[in-house]
Image (cartoon, rainbow, N blue to C red):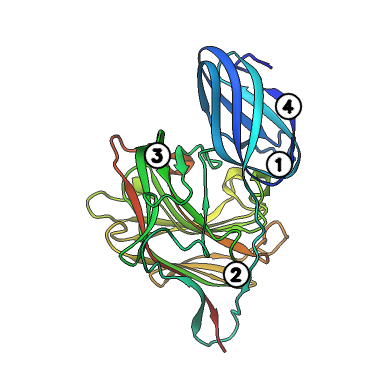
Amino acid sequence: MELDGKVGQDLEVEVPVTGRYQVVIDATTEGTSSIWLEDYIENTDGRTYDITGPMTLSGDGQVSVDGSPLQEGVHRMRVHSSAPATVRSVRFEILRRHRETPTVFIQNTRGSGPWEVVWADEFEGEGVPNPGRWTHDLGNWGWGNREPQYYTDGDPENARLEGGHLIIEARPDDDGHPWTSARLTTRGKASFLYGRIEMRAKVPATDGTWAAGWLLGDDYRDEISWPYCGEVDIMEAVGREIDDASGNGINHGSCHTRAFYFKQGNHISEVIPVQNMDEEFHVYVCEWTPDTIRLFVDGEPYYTYDQHGTPEAWPFDRPQNLILNLAMGGGMGGEIAANAGPQRIVVDYVRVLERRQ
């Protein structure tokens, strides 16, 4: 396959099983070229599905990334390069098969009774996070935002229990990667439909950090699933928006759906000022009913999503899974501070509650 550095070349790939893959491209170029792979090139939404991020090829050899999500079936893809290159092969190796989530918690939200916990992790003990509750997403494929971090699978340097808290730590120049970090999800363990979701956390204030606690539709399989599957951002903070001296910053609250999302310019979101985000714990809350999603920080309401016009506007009648992660850079994190050291999210608890009448 000959690439001229301007127009990509198409290929057809039959994916045998849904899961996360290693993508390996064997190629040669004069000097240096950036190569990346686009999926679903004939999608009807006019989207660009980057499933590898830029991979730097110098001379002759192989470039690869881990964790690219692919759904079973035939895919029309395109290989792009920034300079002329000859691609000898594109190979896909399964790293982890997709596992259906066995348990769905459906919470009652009607009535005026107190909220009571139905699922929680208080992060007591030591070692890695409870494998009965959490799956570790893995890889460095860019996560749809060209993020540089490699999410490790069960490495306690990146995700561990310590002093009654969950520590998610991004580490620079680690294990051959510019950054390593962790992304924990309940996918494959438990998903949730309605209820009150609470997380108490501290986030880092360094430029380039992108801390998040959020919901993603359990029917996500690969990139074409989003935003049809729905997403709710409960805790989302970037370090460049946090004052270095005071720690005061803002939290972003939002919902993403096929009808309303940022890549088509009609994203419905709000922000709320939060004091001392990196040194003090704050409680980030989502109250999700069959009609409405409302977000709070420290008890203060600031966001409501109640769009029901079409199924594309309201995918929130289907289960969602919980995600906690610390990304670096990328589309929202921005430029990473020079000489930045390890960065941390500290999470005190995550709880899912329902009304008891």
Front label number (3 vs 2): 3
In whole angstroms, how far apart are the C-alphas of marks 4 and 1?
Answer: 20 Å
Residue for point 51% across, 60% down: 134
Front label number (2 vs 4): 4
Instruction: Estimate how packed mark 2 is, as few (under 14), some (14 to 19) or many (20 or more) residues with alpha carbons within 10 Å.
Output: some
In whole angstroms, how far apart are the C-alphas of marks 2 and 1?
Answer: 26 Å
Sequence-earlier tag: 4 or 1: 4
In the visual, does 357 lie left or right of 102? left
Can residue 188 be seen here? The reply is yes
Sequence-earlier tag: 2 or 4: 4
Kindly give the residue lying farthest to the top in the view shown: 30
Instruction: Estimate how packed mark 4 is, as few (under 14), some (14 to 19) or many (20 or more) residues with alpha carbons within 10 Å.
Output: some
Name the residue carrying label 2: 292
The amino acid type found where label 2 is placed reads: Thr
Sequence-earlier tag: 2 or 1: 1
Name the residue carrying label 3: 179
Q: Are marks 2 and 1 in contact (CB under 8 Å)?
A: no
- What SS does tag 1 mark? loop
In whole angstroms, how far apart are the C-alphas of marks 2 and 4?
Answer: 43 Å
The amino acid type found where label 3 is placed reads: Trp
- Residue 244 higher or lower than 323, as above or below: above
Q: Are marks 3 and 2 in contact (CB under 8 Å)?
A: no
- What SS does tag 4 mark? strand
Front label number (3 vs 1): 3
